[in-house]
Amino acid sequence: MASAREMRLRIKSVKNISQVTRALETVSASKVRKAINAVTATRSYATKAWQVLKHVAQQPGRDSLHPLLAKHASVKHILAVVITGDRGLAGAYNSNVIRYTSQQFDPSTGFASGQRSNVPVKYIAVGRKGRDLLVRRQKNVIAEFSNLPAAPTFMDVSAIGHLAVEAYKNGEVDEVYLVYTDFVNMSRQITTVKKLLPLELGGEGRVEDFEHSSASTGPAAAYEYEPDQREILDEIIPRFTALQVYQAILESQASEHAARMIAMRNATDNAKELVGALQLAYNKVRQQGITNDILDIVGGAEALAAK
Amino acid sequence: MTIRCEIVSQDRTVFAGDVDMVVLPGAAGEMGILPKHAPVLTTLKYGIIKVRKGGKEELFTVAGGIAEVQPDIITVLADAAENVEEIDEVRAAAARKRAEEVLAKGIPANTDMYLVMEAALRKSNLRLDAVRRYRRGGVRMPTSEN
């Protein structure tokens, strides 16, 4: 058993750690509240925008409507926008995203849309942790965005969506996916992949609406466009696509703070438990020491008295 | 026979409900939408959305955006939208004054700043106009807020 002094030091250090984790928990708790406000405020707009895009994608003759609606003849390159946090200490938050990403996009483990097993994947990393993990796994990271502000505005992140849209337009990539963490509630966040381009008719894969309902109607009739088709599609398709990236970032940030808060609360609880156990062990050691000392004195005194 | 109407601005849902008729300020002019309307996708101008429901009418300002019409639902994605009853007149007037002052100083046209202020001016003009013309019970006295 360790000496009493060592144990005292150990208890002290565990207590210090629990103070740090408790502070982090409090900070995350206030951040998560703000993040939830931000994400729920924009959620209905983003969901509606996505529905409109889907309706547009159901139009007859979509391939000729707009370059972003046209499916590329064959899929030679895939782009994945992977959204993680800049910092760790958030439980399994970051590693979940990366693990899910490789499940979806690694040739060895299969692929989001089925058979295509050997399509090279390019990555755009949003968040420092994701970048580091992807680079370590020797993925082809073509761009990275880190140190995003705590409450990003659409302008702050529109560049990310723009980049993805441009890459698709130029034919550099033939499909664009978005990997993010969907915020459901404080204790539940779902790592999700969403196909951004070309627009799909919907209903594929996992929950992919930001709002967790599917109140979508099933229209097929052709739109009338005002003022004219070209102008309106040019305006809404790139913007609404970029908006999905923005919403995904907000969802991910709320998820990150929630994950960190839970992780830190668990860490604090564990530390408390550990301190309790250590304190008990320390008390035993100390008592043992005192008993030994008394035995020594008593033994010495008796030896003297016996003379 | 009603049609679902949802007006969403970038930061909140402004209106959602089943209504009899909606009048939108479309890019090509005002358009009245009744249930079973043919699908339309249109951009919106700065203007007023009128929502009629059981003989009552609700009014919303909208500062541009798009509207999607399906036979059973109208979705308005507004850049900014507000119920006319909720408009804070004092703030709108102050915003207009600010924008006019900045524009009067003569910042060169076609800069971002110019466009932003011009948009702000148009928006506050729209809101003030909406209040004057449509608010029930006429113009309210300025509140003590701000």
Image: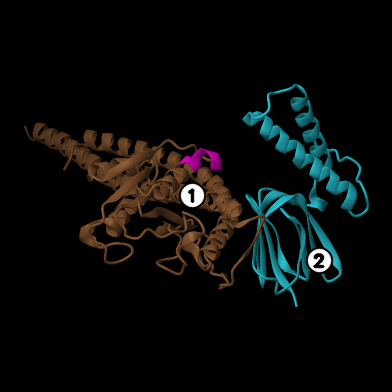
Chain colours: A brown, B cyan
The extreme right residue here reads: B137
Disc 1 sits on a residue from what chain? A
- Residue A31 percent coordinates (x, y): 51, 43
Which quadrant holds the C terminus of chain B? Answer: top right
Q: Position of residue A274 (x, y in %)?
A: 31, 47
Residue A166 can be seen, yes or no: yes
The residue shown at (32%, 57%) is: A100
Position of residue A155 measured from the top left corner of the image (x, y, whole percent) = 54, 39
Magenta stretch secondary structure, dominant = helix
* Contact between labelled residues 2 and 1, with CB atoms less than 8 Å apart: no
- The quadrant holding residue A195 is bottom left
Q: Residue at x 37, y 50 (%)?
A: A171
* Range of residues picked out in magenta: A154-159
Q: Is residue A138 magenta?
A: no
Q: CA distance from mark 1 to mark 2?
A: 38 Å
In depth, the one of A3 and A112 nearer the eye is A112
Q: Residue at image x 78%, y 24%?
A: B104
Relative height, residue A266 to residue B35 (above, below): above
Which residue does the image show at 35% across and 38% down from the upper left? A17
* Residue A175 quadrant: bottom left
Question: Which secondary structure, mark 2?
Answer: strand
Q: Which mark is residue A254?
A: 1
What chain letter is assigned to the residue under label 2? Answer: B
Q: Nearer the viewer, mark 1 or mark 2?
A: 2
Determine which of the numbered discs, if any, sits on residue B52 in the image: 2
> What amino acid is at disc 2?
Arg
The reply to whether residue B88 is in sight is no
